[in-house]
Amino acid sequence: MGPYVRVKRRNQTVFLDVQLTDSFLTVKEKLGSIFSLPPTSIQLWQGLNQVEWIRFDLIFWIFC
């Protein structure tokens, strides 16, 4: 299995298959099409503690 992105949004969790050559913009565009959001409104985070992530609508982690 290759790298993937785990996305947590409210009551949804999505696992997105990505390539190591994918740019952040490519990942944000894929997520934007899934969640019907413009890529410019998606923030990328490596990880957050439980107190911090409550403020954000869309959070994801990258696993290799």
Image (cartoon, rainbow, N blue to C red):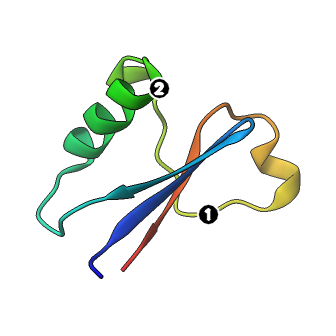
Q: Are marks 1 and 2 in contact (CB under 8 Å)?
A: no
Residue 53 percent coordinates (x, y): 76, 47
Q: Residue at x 46, y 31 (%)?
A: 42
Q: Residue at x 20, y 42 (%)?
A: 26
User: Dividing the picture into quarters, in which one does residue 64 lie?
Assistant: bottom left
Give above or below for 32 relative to 19: above
Q: Residues within 10 Å of mark 1 (few under 14, many from 20)?
A: few
Residue 59 percent coordinates (x, y): 59, 46
Instruction: Tell whether 2 sits left or right of 53.
Output: left
Which image quarter holds the N terminus?
bottom left
Q: Amino acid at mark 2?
A: Phe
Q: Residue at x 66, y 31 (%)?
A: 57
Q: Secondary structure at mark 1?
A: loop
Residue under circle 2?
35
Residue 25 percent coordinates (x, y): 23, 39
Q: Amino acid at mark 1?
A: Gly
Q: Secondary structure at mark 2?
A: helix
Residue under circle 1?
47
Instruction: Tell whether 34 sits left or right of 14.
Output: left
Give above or below for 14 relative to 5: above
